[in-house]
Amino acid sequence: MKASGEKITWITAYDAPFAAFAEQAGIEMILVGDSLGMVDMGYDSTIPVTMDDCISHCQSVRRGAPDTFIVGDMPFGSYQISCENAVANAVRFLKEGGVDAIKLEGGKSVTGQIRAIRDAGILVCGHIGLTPQSSGVLGGHKAQGRTVESARAVIEDALAVEKAGASFLLVEAVPPEVTAFIAQKLAIPVLSIGAGRECDGQLTIFADTIGLFQAFTPKFIKKYCDLAPVIVDAYKQYVKDIKEGLFPGEEHVYHVIGDIGPFRELFKEYE
């Protein structure tokens, strides 16, 4: 697709229903991101997410989208300790989670892990620019590459990740000029999340894209619908119908088979 100029579509999913929606829509890749910690589990960051959390969600996504390319996102602490630990956890993603590739954050600092995982026969997606797991080191959730010095660091990370053996690369929250240069420079596909459209494809968090996540909306998100208020309104109507005795209606119940008489006799036995 990179060679032909066809843009790659990528979106997150954390369970079977939304994975199925993505597959039905023709989205080429699904990321089971550690963003599930904030979107699905209620944490205020991705840091608490565990390997077991990720594996469980990958299994759900695979069941919902059996024919889609799925990427598992290695959570904080699953690859930083050592290359051996990184390979072991990457293997878990494939054997238990049923994914096709893994993603891990970092540039030059994780080239050893990328190389080791790739040498184990596992496809790797790099992730550079704004890397949420290490946002504290970056001074918070801030865009990267906005100065010449910062852009140089992002470019060097991109080159290092490709050289280490990554099969594709995610660039997050970087100016489009920098992303475009990286996409032209690298032979592997370069995808953007908040890094402009001059690259090989796009990733978004599904809950942002369809208006389910209410805490905040990133600058780079286009909402294609706004489901949260629709769902809240539906729940309010549900409450109202129950309180007023309107639900369930006749069309929502199962009636006895045959005459009611024998049932009344049955009930009398317990009076």
Image (cartoon, rainbow, N blue to C red):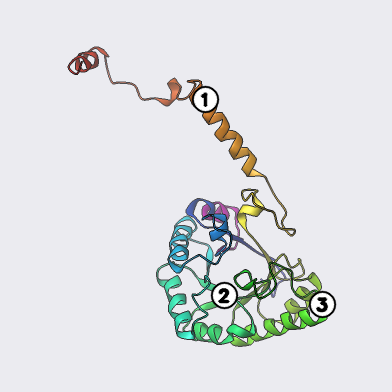
Judge the density around disc 2: few (<14), some (14-19), many (≥20) Cα neighbours within 10 Å. Answer: many
Q: In the rendering, which numbered label is found on residue 139?
A: none
- Disc 3 target residue: 147
- Disc 2 target residue: 104
Q: Residue at x 48, y 54 (%)?
A: 16
> In the image, which is nearer the foreground, mark 2 or mark 3?
3
Q: Position of residue 191 (x, y in %)?
A: 68, 70
Q: Position of residue 190 (x, y in %)?
A: 68, 74
Residue 120 shown in magenta: no
Q: Give whichever of discs 3 and 1 has the lower sequence position.
A: 3
Q: Position of residue 230 (x, y in %)?
A: 62, 38
- Disc 1 target residue: 241
Part of the protein shown in magenta: 19-32
Decide: is 268 above or below 99.
above
Quick one: 57 or 197, which is closer to the camera?
57
Q: Position of residue 110 (x, y in %)?
A: 58, 83
